[in-house]
Amino acid sequence: MQKGLISIDRWSEKSQAYFLTHLHADHTEGLSPHWSGGPIFCSPISARLFPCKFPGFDLSLLRVLEVGRTHPLSLSSPTNGSEVQILVTPIDAHHCPGAVMYLFRGEFGCVLYTGDFRWELKSERAKLAKKTLLDALQGDKVNNLYLDNTYCHPSFSFPPREVAAQQVVDIITQHPNHEIVVGIDTLGKEGLLLHISQALSTKIWVWPERLQTMHLLGFDNIFTTKTSLTRVRAVPRYSLTFETLEALNTIHPTIGIMPSGLPWGLKSPKVDDTFGTSLENCCECKGSATSRIQLETNQIQPPRKLHRYAYSVPYSEHSCFTEIEEFVKIIKPSVVTGIVSSSFYYINPRHYFGYLCGFGHLFHKPCRNFRCEKAKNAEVNQCQSFPRCRSSNKLKERKEGSIKFASFSVRSSRLSAIRKGKCGVKIMEID
Ligand SMILES: [Zn+2]
């Protein structure tokens, strides 16, 4: 594909067509209500949420693509002006509402960009997504797979969201006289809240802007902004801190629940000493040699009590390692590149999945056993010896400390455990 044709979740550089996978902030950095860069292709649900996320946005710039259908797109060559025909198929990413991955096909071959995705293959939605993907490919090979590598390490093993949601319900049931606060983002985890509401026959409090989003998503009678109607409140996760919980407990017994893949499995022996941090950040490595933390083995474990008033539950909107692996096995791309370029850590998916890709004979299947002596001294960032992408260059530039991933050493961001911007690609510029 020629340079300057298409950008995905990247808004700072000139392209003929822009594609949005979903409306999370790290995928919309550079997008604003004053956007005039060109048409934006997105799913119907993302289009519906646009005015809420970007009040005043010129909605005539949106090109809404039906999910699961292949759409022809005609662009013109930036070099000679000739017509460039592209087929694009948005596929349900089963992440937050409206999230899709995009399959592009044309004379350039096949490019699949996952955006953020969860690949729970036993779910009907993932089965349908797999069928849509294979039907759209028509037997062709994916040349370039741009992959959500958020949890691309064998240490990350989550149960299906349905199981994690029931764990949350069980915690709530075990605290019948407590107020419950659940940390969420401005979009996502709706499935968890619906599960709680249905299992406990209760409404759920959300803040006013979140209620507007819920109404746009069609959830009219489940959520409320009246605290008197329910003891379960969904609050912005940045506001869910140990200090808040301590303060709330001086008024009324309160339990905080953080549903997230990130804190799950992180083992910090002094986790109760982390007052003053948000629950999301409590397992964050601060970059010093003494703040190393370890990931546990990949066994599914019960919810973890982080603090006397706080629980971590592995409810993740991203795929865990085995799900990513299953996905790559289905796709078997020629080249795989991670799309998360600024996060808690960066692991080049080629380290684990290079053996499934083209030129697989050049890659060995890495050992998954954390205790394995052979793996003991392996550095995940040995993947730097593989062809570089922009992300790995960034990784190389970092000077921060390292986090202990069992026997592996991975560089981490000093700034935050929360994913930051710089997702997305102008797809000709990588590889
Ligand atoms: Zn996301």
Image (cartoon, rainbow, N blue to C red):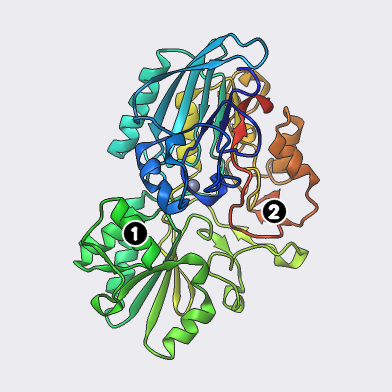
Q: Is residue 56 visible?
A: yes
Q: Relative to 115, is 196 on the left or the right?
A: left
- Taking the image as shown, residue 318 lies to the left or right of residue 338, namely left
Q: Secondary structure at mark 2?
A: loop
- State the count of labels: 2
Residue at 47% over, 51% down: 54
Please give the name of the residue rendered at 76% of the width and 64% of the height, measured from the top-left corner: 288
Q: Give the residue at the far left of this rendering.
A: 201
- Establish if 101 lies above or below 178: above
Residue projecting furthest to the bottom: 250
Q: Earlier in the sequence, mark 2 or mark 1?
A: 1
Residue shown at 46% from the left, 13% from the top: 140
In this image, 287 relative to 282: left or right? Answer: right
Relative vertical location of residue 165 with respect to residue 427 in this rendering, above or below:
below
The location of residue 259, given as percent across then percent down, is: 43, 61
Q: Which residue, given by chain and number where applicable, does mark 2 sit on?
A: 412
Q: Quadrant of the C terminus?
A: top right
Distance between the Cα atoms at labels 2 and 1? 36 Å
Q: Is mark 1 within 8 Å of ligand 1?
A: no
* Residue identifier under label 1: 212
Which mark lies nearer to you, 2 or 1?
A: 1
Amino acid type at circle 1 is: Gln
